[in-house]
Image (spheres, grey):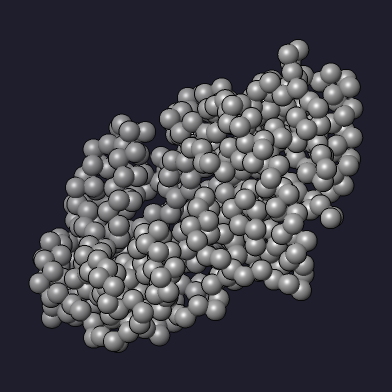
Amino acid sequence: MNNVNLSKSKYCSAKSCFKKLWMQKYKPQEAIQKARDAVFKNGIAVGNLAKGLFGKYEDVEFNKNLNVMIEKTKELLKQNAKIITEASFLYDNNFCSVDILKNTKDGFEIYEVKSGASLKDINIDDVSYQYFVLTRLGYNVKKAFLVYINNEYIRHGELELKKLFNIEEVTEEAKSKIGEIELNIKVINSFMEEYTKDNEPESKLGMHCKDPYMCDYWEYCTKDLPKPNVFDINKLDWTKKFEKYEEGKISFKDLQNENLAKRFQEQIDFEVENLEPKINVEAIEQIMNSLKYPLYFIDYETIQPVIPEYEGTWPYEQLPFQYSLHVIKEKGAEVEHREFLADIDDKDFLRHFVESMIKDMPEDGSVIIYNNSFEPVINRQLAQLFPDLEKELTRINANIVDFQVPFRSRDYYVKEMEGSYSIKKVLPALYPNDPDLDYHKLPSVHNGTEASDTFLNMRNMSKEEQEEIRKGLLVYCELDTYAMVKIWEKFKEIIGG
């Protein structure tokens, strides 16, 4: 038997799903990784930062030729290096790099670094695999640890690594998994020997596709399912989805009489029976009657840096860097547009964001947003950061009206919303085939995740490239607030206003 060349990431993938390992080897082009790009980049940034957690260290640089890394590690161990980062080892085709290896007089300590603010079971498997490789090579591993982000840390002055990271010992858990890992490796090798390039294993869908992470091959493995299917039911618990799938109730037609909650059944019935739009005119009148001029339609874009770069902020805090604002000063007035987009090099961009917004919304009037759990929360955080601006931010929050409400409560629902109340679904459902309202046709930025990633990536761009990206960000954010203006116009049409 030719043993599979395993790494800690491949081992964890196979433990979740053997087919995933097969896909990585034979059909890697089918992976859809966009959603996890930010997670990957965060992992690299956090890993690099954590290298300095215990002071001076010797680093084993990445090399495609793993033997180079292994030999460099052996040299450093011969030199009795105390802290080695990315120390690399190979046992019987099982390779691992240890994020931080501490060489003490009593033995080795291994530290696996994670960019999340909490731990998952798969993280234990990760460090346990490393413990297995090192102990099988005869190294005396005394302790094993997981290092992860302390999201209660608030930055004041210089970054304090000891406070930024939590360190949790998992030595006993790692020891207890030795037998399991040895057995898993044998089963993985047997599986990969049976299922060669021309012998693709079947897709066995289950919670492992979603937990601990949504699989990069989900779209490939579900490509032959009827559309729409049980996995397209918006907001239905994944456990319930897989339960119905196992029962063979996959298409919407299969699910029509399943006694699901009203909102789920409604999505299914509207799709299967092609029902007419459902509009509660009284609910629309209620939200429209609550409005007071001037009308401010506003939307924020935010970044969530895992490493707090700014005074008074914490890991993964949402920091607004951009807003778009459409203003209607009085009944019958023309729509005006205002906007703010931070400079990527501006260390005070948060304050400049708030000052610009206050200047652009000087009067009391309805502040129209889409999702009451977003902008108001950020405003309260900004008020804590800038106490001198708290009064104005509180005023803005007191005037907020959430246009998502009638869609979330299903007082306004059409089939094309596909069970969602996201503005990306609602807008084309209300205005089908309008190219000016099509997010897919925007030049470079199409959603909030892209906006955040694009803004952060500007640091590595030339001035000319930055200007092009800024144009894309402004066009995208402007559509978000123009969308709310169009929803307001649709509401007016409904109530005959």
User: Which x, y percent locates residue 271?
Assistant: 33, 82
User: Which x, y percent locates residue 139?
Assistant: 79, 25
Q: Quadrant of the N terminus?
A: bottom right
Q: Quadrant of the C terminus?
A: bottom left
**Depth check: 141 or 182 in front?**
182
Report the side of 268 relative to 457 (left or right): left
Residue at image point 19% right, 56% down:
365
User: Which x, y percent locates residue 315?
Assistant: 48, 36
Q: Is residue 121 visible?
A: yes
Report the side of 62 relative to 417 (left or right): right
Image position of 463 with respect to 221: above or below: above
Q: Quarter-wise, where is residue 96 in the image?
A: top right
Residue at image point 68% right, 21% down:
142
User: Which x, y percent locates residue 276?
Assistant: 23, 86
Report the side of 310 relative to 127 (left or right): left
Residue at image point 84% right, 31% down:
73
Image position of 135 with respect to 220: above or below: above
Q: Is residue 311 visible?
A: no
Image position of 232 with respect to 455: above or below: below
Q: How many marks?
A: 0
**Depth check: 202 or 318 in front?**
202
Image position of 135 with respect to 63: above or below: above
**Depth check: 326 or 225 in front?**
225
Residue at image point 87% right, 33% down:
72
